[in-house]
Image (spheres, coloured by chain):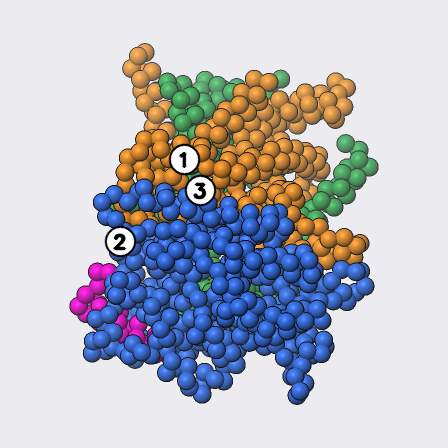
Chain colours: A green, B blue, C orange
Amino acid sequence: MNRKKTGILAIILALGAVLFLLPVALIFVTAFKPDSEIIHFQSLLPQTWTLENFREILGNPEEIPIFRWFSNSVFISCMVTALVLLVDSMAAYGLARLDLPGKKAAFFLILATLMIPGQILLVPVYLILNALGWLDTPWALIVPAGAGAFGVFLLHQFFLGIPRELEDAAVVDGCSRLGIYWRIILPLSKPALATLGIFVFLGSWNDFLGPLVFLDSVDKYTLPVGIALFQTSYFAEYGLTLAACVICTLPVVIVFLLLQRHIIEGISLTGLKG
Amino acid sequence: MLRIVRRFNRENPDVHVLMQRMDWVTYYNKLFVAGLGERAPEVFIVHAGNIERFMQADFIRPIDDLVIGPHGMDEKDFTENIWSAVEKEGRHYALPLDVHMLGMYYNKKLFREAGIVDERGEPRPPRTRREFMDALDQLTRDTDGDSEPDQWGFVYTWYRTNAYTIMRQWGGKFFTPDNQRCLLNCPENVEALEFCVDLIRKHKLVPPPENFDSWIGFRQGKVGIAFEGIYMLEDLKKQEDLEYGGAPLPLLGKIPAAWCDSHTICLQRDLEGKRLEAAWRFARYLSDNSLDWAEGGQVPVRKSLRDTKRFRQMRVQYEFAKQIPYVRYVPRIPFVFEFFSEYETAVEKALRGSLPPREALDIATENINGIIQRREQMQTTRGTSP
Amino acid sequence: MRKGKFLSRFSGYLFLLPYLSLFGTFLLLPVCYGLGLSFFRWEMLSLAPPRFIGFGNYMEAFRTPYFWMALGATFRFVIMIVPLVVIGALVVAAGINALPGRFQALFRAAYFFPTIISISVAGILWRWFFNTEFGLFNALSGLAGFKAPWITDVNWAMKSIVFMTLWWTLGGPMVILLAGLRQIPTQYREAAAIDGANALQRFFYITLPILRPVLLFVVVMSIIASFQVFGQTFMITRGGPELSTRVLMQYIYETAFTNYRIGFGAAMSWLLFLVIALFSFVQFRIIREG
């Protein structure tokens, strides 16, 4: 595309991006306003920059063990991401490529579960976790997360898009199935895996209902649940809520920025014959 | 509350209380799911308005033996109507901690500017319907010349509490005494709702409702009067540039009334021995220290605590507490949420002008009677009232 | 050779084993429980024990106007949001993909950012935006002389929710489509360009067909997700005004967890599932064959 067209495109996209980011910027900026100023919504930027919202959240470790919650969240989200990436990619590979009878049925069954409203699972899963003795432990949040079909579906579709010739070449070279999976499919799927990783991490990090119902002790809580729980008023305490949001969101932003490099890498197939 | 708990833990080394708090919606759900897995806490707080279903589900332990016992309390220290709110078939199932009623918050600055003051130049909150309407007349103004009012005399906040109070003030009923039939569409309620609607549509003194988000307007200083619960005081304290006052609700109808609810302390049903003793000790401690609790925007239920100088200095709480003799709880039914869903929808439709009040209430009444019938059909041999 | 095939199949199943065991325990089992629940009358607010009533709950759903109202609200949401979000995401992804690689990261992050914000905060923010008397949007538009009843007018409310959802969820499909686009070897498009195809032709004849599986994923997931919409309406309008935005998920939630009518709630969940399955199946056929 020539320079001029690229330039125009960039400008249009930039305008859209600004509109998308404005509300987010608003959140970050408002977290630094004192509560009495927030309610008036007069100016977008704070007239008095204050850290009082952050201080109230961070400076109260007995009532708000925020670093505890933070490490719980990190542990759980990382474990969930690793579990899902591994387990789902294997299953997706099996369903997309391997010649297994009944795999079409299995695929549709798995897909169908995505359509089931999650609330209906809450009570039975609770009872199962109770029977396993996993309630009030991180495992209650990690293990069931591996059952989700989102990753299987996503990777299945991506694997379908990888040219078969690559695998055929590997088979000819004597590569085992596991080897194909590990050395060909996975590296080629970095964009998909990174994308899935972001979604899974995000979903686990922001998950509210799960930790709320399956965890009891305050020191086991994850970040979003912990922060929400110390709000007592009936309606929003804007300053605290937004400051909490900033604290909660920052790690995800970092993870996202780290992972997105891999999404950009496309495939270069210079070695392939036409 | 946490400070009180911490003090208790310090002063009672043989008992350790772990406190958790969360917003009410998630709290009740968690309590419910926990109860299923038999992991409910030993002591928990329930709104008096919700207590009926916990009673019926046999979830909580009556406390009469504890009240009379060695660490007991004086029953007469509780106001009649509050103590009977936790009573069923002669037994009391929870210890009321506080009562939070609806009251009138008013913006002192706007009142002074509008000239609604007494002889000393202090803002004069309205006490009768006449005074209320006059105040609204003077407070609802268009300040920036676009022929739309942007300062309002009054806004409706939470439909539930506002409408309930006004209907009670008109003498309206909600159920027959045995809770078997819904009377929501009785003439008094219709009249009361028509009054509310007229304020918006006929007199144009009140903006169309936005449910509890209208409270934002009061905090911004653009609203003269709002009816809200005493628990909103905490929210107002943060608004340093707002000069607010509290007062008993004006008598808009014929009978003084104000919506109220209470936080009550419940004990798990199967407690016994040492745990029971510890739990009761904690419950009593909370009750004895409810003045600390009141600072955050609550009113203690015990007369002895209200009679103190310390409480009198809590200006807004003190004013709101004047309504205690005539505060009204919501109807004691286990299906209270379903009831309110119908009720609030009807009120909303009327206030927005989608349906005339009579019709809206008729529909709601019909639906609620349907709910009662459904529940009756479900009772097998037990014969408990729905 | 048969033994080889058996071993090959067996090792193939091993790939599926870890996932399927988790799936079976934490999805299939609870789902069966949930299905069973729907055939019982179980209301925790009364002391009557759970009673088997066959399809009674389902019949009650069909007879209740509230069920149809809620389904209708969900429907209106889906019809509006899915085309908007898919096409929007595709356009943005294609646009970003056409930029030089260095800039892509920046733009992609910008459009994805809203998705990172949790619903509770996004909900609070937009509730303030939409407030008729005291909110931000009307404060801005008030300067131009009009105030919109964003979430107080029955005809506006759902559209406002869709608007907010577009902002909040565009990033997800966009990132996925972008990854899909990046997976298409540039050589294909360069070859087509050499052959004389212009940008639009290249897009429709080269890009789109290769993108089809990923596009199918995005469309189907959008449908599935939007049928289950709950957070936005719960946080911003609480189902109002006048229940016009009370989507089926909220009605189910209130039925099961607020009114404690577990059996009835379960039945409605299954009805919603059937609707979702039907729609997704149709989409599958259209996109796969078409």
Camera sees residue A187:
no
Main SS of the magenta segment? Answer: helix
Q: Are marks 3 and 1 on the same chain?
A: yes
Point 25% across, 43% down: residue: B380
Pointer 3 residue: C252
Figure quadrant of residue C77: top right
Q: Which stretch is magenta?
A: B269-288
Q: Residue furthest top?
A: C1
Q: Are marks 3 and 2 on the same chain?
A: no
Q: Is residue B287 magenta?
A: yes
Q: CA distance from mark 3 to mark 2?
A: 24 Å
Pointer 2 residue: B38
Q: Nearer the viewer, residue C286 or B168?
A: B168
Q: What kind of residue is marked 2? A: Glu
Q: Secondary structure at mark 1?
A: helix
Mark 2: few/some/many CA within 10 Å (<14, 14-19, 20+): few
Q: Chain of mark 1?
A: C
A209 displayed left or right of B146? left
Q: Which mark is residue C113?
A: none
Q: Residue B342: percent from the left, percent from the top?
A: 48, 49
Q: Residue A222: percent from the left, percent from the top?
A: 42, 55
Q: Quadrant of the N terminus of chain B?
A: bottom left
